[in-house]
Amino acid sequence: MIRQINRVTGVIILLLLALIVNLSYIQVFKAGDFRGQSGNQRVTLTEYSRERGPILLASQAIAESTPTNDSLKYLREYADGSIYAAITGFYSVVYGATGIESEENSVLAGNDSRFFVDRLQQLFANREPKGGAIRLTIDPDAQIAAMKALNGRTGAVVAIDPTTGAILALASSPSFDPNLLSSHDAGDIQANYEKLNADPDQPLLNRPLAMTLPPGSTFKLVTAAAALESGKYSADSELPGPSKINLPGTDVQLGNWNGKSCGADDVTSLQSALEISCNTAFAWLGMELGADAIDEQAKKFGFDSEFGVPMNAAVSRFPVDPNQPQTAMSAIGQFDVRATVLQMAMVAAGIANDGVVMKPYLVSQVLGPDLTVLQSTNPSAFGRAMSIENSRILRDMMVGVVENGTASKARIPGISVGGKTGTAENAPGEPAHAWFVGLAPSSQSKVAIAVVLQNGGGASEVSGNALAAPIAASVMRAILNK
């Protein structure tokens, strides 16, 4: 009998120990995970009972909380909400948070461990607790210029300071008003969300970060970089540039966008091939370099890598083990090459920054509830994509594209601009995507930019120049004319 009692006692003790260990594990290690789960109403009510911190551009709040008279004590409001929606995201009592509201929630909600002293001071001073603030890198003039130039058309813009990686503009169109999802009326929020989610134009999609598309002829910058870095080619190197070439082992003929030869006797230079966006020359060059060399160069610019800005960007890809015809198409940004707008801006930024690609970021500073600076972002390099000499050669080649070639609409009076247009195939019967990638000024560049207009126009470099380049020029002017 005593032995049985001891056994039962031992089992109870083991169960109690297991319970204590489990509770301790949850409270110490998993509390943050449970607290961050969407739908946690207790956390939601707690967060709405305190003033959520603002999201700032310099000292201007583009998202802030205002007091109310209902059970949720604060209402999240967004100034010029549709202009900054791709950045701020939304903060919703029904659908949780997206964008900066989600990625920096611990700071904005006041739960960050760095606020421990602030919370103690608020407690002893009997002050209402409040969240910290996030200051962004966005240039409001550039962001407004980007959204105005997009003018509701389906597309995206990313502008970067090439020397630091700071994102100056991140625009997605069509956009949405986050105020529609941040009210305290659950019925209205749900109706608004369902309407936005059902919209075929996908206003909730973060196009600069989440969308990958064939980059078209803008990818010729990567192929040109691989050629220069190989040591076998210079800007003056001669390449075959006939009006059409046969892709090896196939019945496919690849032609130039204008149907013409790229030079006298079907010969062109690497410089001229980039200026006039010669498909046949770059397809030949891609096969000569080989897929591995182009893949390696693309990776040095950021392809196949993950980037959080802090929102995660989709990974850009170069095809795995393409054959020769596929390599030829990949060298001109077709076949299975896919890139985000952020990635193509990083390509321009690496060329602009003497060959060094910087890690992109949106958060400049983390601030306490009293707006004292707790942390500032230190720019860091992703890696070297090109030598200084070759990056400057390619930068000058890009200037030639704007001054003498297919990107004339990117010109800015008094400023030397470099760029590359592109078009990318779409679904059969649909207009091509129009691209532009650029930098300015050409020496000591202050901005690198990528623009895409989905379903933008015909399958030629004309649409990249006519549609995407003017958008880039507007944004670059807003940044440079300070």
Image: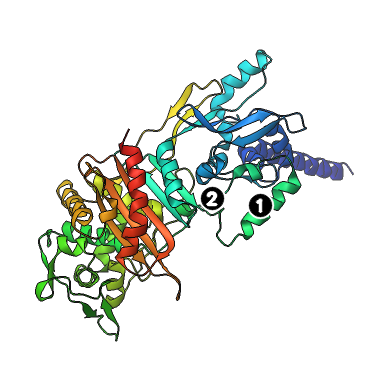
Residue depicted at 13% across the width and 71% down the height: 263
- Picture residue at 83% right of the left edge, 44% below the top: 8
Residue 44, percent from left and from top? 70, 38
Question: Percent x, y for residue 190?
Answer: 71, 51
Q: Which residue is mark 2?
A: 175
- Residue sitting at the far front: 413
The quadrant in which residue 69 appears is top right
Q: Secondary structure at mark 1?
A: helix
- Left or right: residue 423 compared with residue 23: left
The Cα atoms of the two marked residues, 2 and 1, are separated by 13 Å
In this view, 246 is above or below 285? below
In front: 275, or 481?
481
Viewer-proximal residue among 252 and 453: 453
Along the horizontal axis of the image, is 84 left or right of 451? right
Mark 2 residue element = loop
Quadrant in the picture for residue 119: top right
The residue to which callout 1 is attached is 193
Which of the two marks, 2 or 1, is nearer to us in this view? 2
